[in-house]
Image: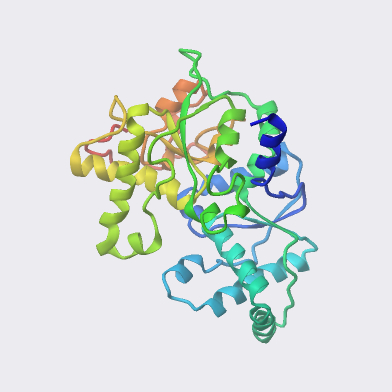
Amino acid sequence: MIPEGKKKLWAKYQKEIAEDYYYYARSCIRQNFFPGSESTFLRILKGELGKSILDDPRHTTCTGIAYHTDLVPIETTMTVVARQFALMHEAGLENYVASCVTSFGIYTEILDLWHHNPEMEEKAHELLYKATKREFIKPKNLVHTSDIIYKFREEIAQKSKYRLINKETGEPLKVVEHIGCHYAKMFPHKGVGGAEYPHVLVGMIESWGGDVVDYPERRHCCGFGFRQYLVKANRGYSVSASKKKFESMAPYKPDFILSNCPGCAYFLDRWQYVIADMEGTTYDDKGYGIPSLTYEELAGLVLGYDPWDLGLQLHQVNVEPLLKKIGVEYDPDAKFSSKDGKDLGKPEKPEVLKY
């Protein structure tokens, strides 16, 4: 294909990402799974990139988990979403940034519902006003937080202290990326690269010096899926889905996994501990497992942030072998200490997975 034709075709897989002045909606589960990621995102946006972003304490859950497990009706979800949009409008903003991939999917789905069914949007106005006396305006731009980091990946690269290079060999680190299902599988045109060629994490990895590893089960679900995990009897499905991915990526010896969904990053981390204890299997040569990072954690690492400020000590798979490969300067003795040096206690070590 001639270059101009290729550029024209690729342009169809791009999305508009606002330049500045964002309304930030946090994620329920990310604040529990990876509490350092959201604070790191805000630190990068404000401190490194000089952007304006409102972290509004008044917003609530998007109801995504309850919606996908049939615990709340669509009318409840769209009224809650309408309230979030009303808060954004009251703040004088129009660019909405969702921290969670599931929330991004919920907001996208509700906007699509209103587009095709205007009577449902009218109903949302009525329900919101009846409940809160508020009015809402739909966002001009709706993106996921990974879209923002992707947009400014080159600026982050220019400010970086570290590259994704093995300091001993000089070779690029090998990275497997995992895209959350709710990012672009539901509405492909809403993700960078769509569902076929998602580029949001690939762009970060390449800009920061790493090599992206392609492997057979690259687009396979991590298995989190709310019913698979929340219903205890279904958890075998969840862990088996992740196991299928681990077995597929292991022969390529990746240095770490990068995800843009809080559930995916969490389960691709925790299930390695479970599989190690169940079967005695680890997916690297030395028994540590494959570190699973969020994109903010990775951005923070390349910018030179302290790994314990990023919350990397909360990962089940030990990240210190990766830190040493990159050459990150850190204090191993501060791993389980508070900011004022108080000992927070060490977790019990797994029986199989080295920690």
Q: Residue at x 28, y 49 (%)?
A: 240
Residue 82 in view: no
Q: Position of residue 12 (x, y in %)?
A: 67, 47
Q: Residue at x 68, y 30 (%)?
A: 2
**Residue lying at the far front of the rendered structure:** 1
Q: Position of residue 265 (x, y in %)?
A: 44, 45
Asked where in the image residue 286 lies, by quadrant, the reply is: top left
In the image, taking residue 307 as reference, residue 126 lies left or right, namely right
Q: Residue at x 69, y 30 (%)?
A: 3
Asked where in the image residue 217 lies, by quadrant, the reply is: top left
Q: Quadrant of the C terminus?
A: top left
- Compared to residue 155, the image places residue 65 above or below, namely below
Number of marks in picture: 0
Residue 219 in view: yes
**Residue lying at the far right of the rendered structure:** 92
Which is nearer the eye, 329 or 231?
A: 231
Which is nearer the eye, 135 or 16?
A: 16
Q: Position of residue 96 (x, y in %)?
A: 69, 58
